[in-house]
Image (tube, grey):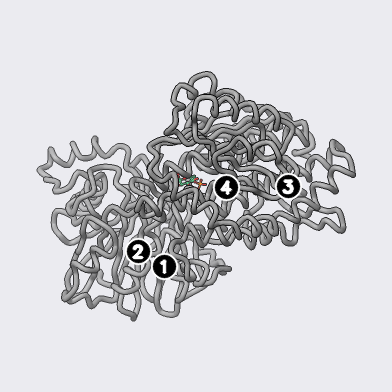
Amino acid sequence: MCGIVGYTGPKEAYPIVITGLKRLEYRGYDSTGVALLNGGLKVYKKKGRVADLEAAVLGENLHAHTGIGHTRWATHGEPSDVNAHPHLSASGKLAMIHNGIIENYAQLKKELSNKGYVFKSETDTEVLLNFIEDIRENNQCDLEEAVRVALKRVTGAYVILLVDQDQPDTIIAARKGSPLVIGVGKGEHFLGSDASPMLEYTKEVVYVNDYELAIVKPNELILKNLGNEKLTPFVTKLDMELAAIEKGGYDHFMLKEIFEQPLTIHDCLRGRLDANAGTITMSGVANNIEHFKNAGRIIIVACGTSWHAGLVAEYIIEELCRIPVEVEYASEFRYRNPVINKGDIIFAISQSGETADTLVAIERAKEQGAIIFGIVNVVGSSIARISDGGAYTHAGPEIGVASTKAFTGQLAVLTMVALKIAKEKGRISDERYQQLLVELEAVPEKVAAILKNAPAIKAIAEKYKGATDALFLGRGYNFPIALEGALKLKEISYIHAEGYPAAEMKHGPIALVDENLPVVFVATKDAYHEKIVSNIQEIKARKGQVIAIITEEDDLIPALANEVFYVPPADEIIAPMLSCIPLQLLSYYMGVARGVDVDKPRNLAKSVTVE
Ligand code: G6P
């Protein structure tokens, strides 16, 4: 949550910072601000999107070679001009931006108020900034030392960028729990919550670790720990092109990302799955194969859409590998006292690799001796780095707030992992293994076929766009897909939606059914098909509007449903990767039809780095 950008070097800072903020808007978009060092310290900030700030500063002298910028997802204090970052210290000499939460800010605020400090905003950030300034003045130390002392007193998570009007070419940065990337250019440095703001300038980046502090000048990058020991920055080469973070002719990133899925799933399988040779090559699994073979249990921790991928994996792993699986919301897992046995493996599933709850959940489990296997999309992210092993989903940058291509990437990785373990454990017949490899290899092509029929889903979306509520039902492997369909619809269209196991709906949700309620059945052909047909009858008997996602050869459901959308036949283990696609399209088209900014729906953020 919250995007941060910084630049120091010979170029004009403002355009770099503003362009960077636009790329980071997926992280939060309720207010925007920049601080520029140009002889003095100038701060411009505004409630609203980056474009609103741009409009507000037209005509201003924005010339500066050092600047920082922030796009906010509010935690402390409502979105407003005054709560927007950067914040100025009491003296007006320091400006700071912050991503995260200072948990003990109330205590610090009290201490500072007793000393006479008056706060303009309701933010924890302004408290930390004045705390730093107070230490600098009282200890008569330099800013860097004051930051170190302050951060040792702070609990919570942060990335901060701090500038001082008396050091016009320097940005001080520090991180704990929220992401920070520093781009190394020739005589210039870039800072960002991810690498997107610096892509066109440099491919050389340093991922800053927790409890590290960076002093960044055009020609110098000094990295230290909070104990003031110098560290050697580890420079990594980025494997990402600018085109990957642009819309490429689509109206929205979400639509682009939905349509990219034949390619992204193919990229995920490439180099790993070889159906001809009958092999799956995954070094993250191979390196830990004895652990996997002997695992007493797999515990999956994740949030949001990634949690739904975990639920599908539970069905697949238990079926193929006969290893018990538990799927946990990371936010619950981290605060309860879970039993973790020797030999348990924790799967952390995360698109961003930065979700605070997932990150802390696996830190806790690691402390208890669990092995962590990360299934992550963003290369070099915190979860990827803390994991003992893992597999990237290789879906490329996902920018639309609602996760789509990362989800199918997660399903593809999890299916390969399950197949590999099942094979190594001798739990799967050669015939079934080979059949599933062939089916998995065919997924990109089948997804492409589904996407060709997008206009049919668009027509359904147009017809039902006035709905106030919707129910999504599925059984077996398609139950988590029903949950995911409901989540997508509510986040993108603001229609209240609930996902349920199709049979369980008789224990409550059926009371909601009337002629106005769209009920989406995820009813591809599988072992439970006849059962779900009965559930459709039950909804029809109560006049519900049935929208059914079905397999091409289905000859029962078309006669019952109000609307049907066909997907190609597939094994039930593979089917979720297909049945989720029409639901992504349904939510997208409904959101657009209802006038929602689908890439940036209200109150949401793509990367939830606060708990
Ligand atoms: C946010 C995003 C979701 C995502 C969830 C978990 O809520 O809007 O799309 O599924 O976080 O994020 P992660 O990056 O850990 O997968």
Dot 2 and dot 1 residues touching (CB under 8 Å): yes
Residue in the foreground of this view, choosing between 120 and 545: 545
Tell me how far mark 4 sits from mark 2, CA to CA.
27 Å
Q: Is residue 128 left or right of residue 232?
A: left
Q: Which residue is mark 4?
A: 386
The numbered dot on residue 569 is 3
Going by the numbered disc 4, the residue's amino acid type is: Ile
**Could you tell me the amino acid type at mark 3?**
Pro
Residue corresponding to mark 2 = 21
- Which residue extends farthest front? 559
**How many angstroms separate mark 1 from mark 3 (CA)?**
42 Å
Mark linked to residue 197: 1
Residue name at image x 89 percent, y 44 percent: 431
| Residues at circles 1 and 3 in contact by the CB criterion of under 8 Å | no
Question: Looking at the image, is mark 3 or mark 4 earlier in the sequence?
Answer: 4
Q: Nearer the viewer, residue 562 or 11?
A: 562
Q: Position of residue 27 (x, y in %)?
A: 39, 54
Q: Sequence order check: which comes first, mark 3 or mark 2? A: 2
Mark 1 or mark 3, which is nearer to you?
3
